[in-house]
Image (cartoon, rainbow, N blue to C red):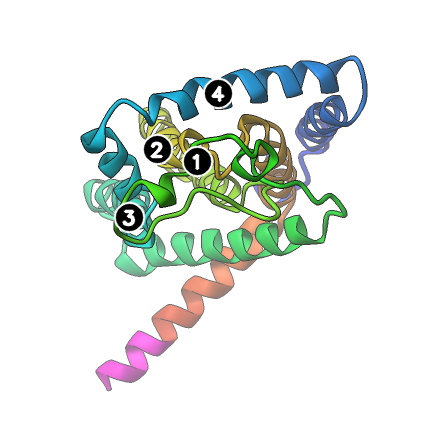
Amino acid sequence: MSENLWKIKSLVLVNIFAIVLFVSWLYEPMSSFWYSVDSEAFWAFNNSLAWGETWQVIWGIANNRAFDVVAAIGIVTPFFYYGYKQKWKLSHTFSILILAGLVVVSTTSIGKKIPIERESPTRHFESSVKLTELVSFETKDSSGDSFPGDHGSTLVIFVGFAFFYLSLSYGFFVSFLAIFFAFPRVMVGAHWVSDELVGALSIGLIMLSFVFFTPLHNFLLTKIEFLIDFVIKKIKR
């Protein structure tokens, strides 16, 4: 099927899966299952923070804002390397990443409008260990509204773009990076497991389905790349 056409079957199936996943978190009996997973995972991770100062510093660094820059560089690097190996124009690689960025902004904006307010587990469980009380530098261990995970939904979007525009092996590699970079927020209790596995994944899949299973991605990518090439030509003149 031409990439300019709607892929209705894929669009419907992905949205059904995402909606079922989301609904499973809202209603019994699955909501109890998710709470059980969330609680057990949180206490296992939270109790580990008593292992010692070195362990605490590692997770403090991993949840520092500066580490988000490392995560961003780590996620986009495979796109540049793949583009270099495939001899893509640099403007093409930048266009893909700009489009991904636009989808991320749209996804996080929609996520904030979901009428669900959920405190992070460190706020929900008053007796939990707070990493911010254990390290001497700025870090994050809580959120007043943790669902869905913005950090996680951003990573889901980039994973989707990697599978679509790069090779299968690169897609799996970016998936590994996404799990690696999303885990610190869950580890310290800034997010529940289901914030990522349900919230971020479901909204991310819905957004990706409307980008890639409709003519939207091809239309936007063409426009963005044209604009970048136009600007480059103007600069060279």
Residue to which mark 4 is pinned: 43
Q: Is residue 27 left or right of residue 11?
A: right
Q: Secondary structure at mark 2?
A: helix
Question: Could you tell me residue 92's position as x and y percent?
Answer: 35, 55
Is there CB contact under 8 Å for labels 2 and 1? yes
For disc 3, the marked residue is: 67
The tally of labels here is: 4
* Quarter location, residue 178: top left
Residue type at the position of mark 3? Phe
Question: x, y (%) of residue 20?
Answer: 74, 23
Q: Residue at x 35, y 33 (%)?
A: 174
Q: Between marks 3 and 1, how big is the CA–CA gap?
A: 19 Å
Q: Give the residue at mark 2.
A: 174
Marks 2 and 4, how far apart in space?
A: 28 Å
Q: CA distance from mark 4 to mark 3?
A: 24 Å
- Which of the two residues, 114 or 192, is positioned nearer the viewer here? 192
**Could you classify mark 2 by the number of other residues whose Cα lies within 10 Å: few (under 14), some (14-19), or many (20 or more)?**
many
The numbered mark at residue 159 is 1
Query: Which is nearer the N-term, disc 2 or disc 1?
Result: 1
Instruction: Looking at the image, tell me whether mark 2 or mark 3 is earlier in sequence order.
Output: 3
What secondary structure is marked by label 1? helix
**Residue 50 belongs to the span the image colors magenta:** no
Q: Of the numbered discs in the image, which one, if any, rests on residue 106?
A: none
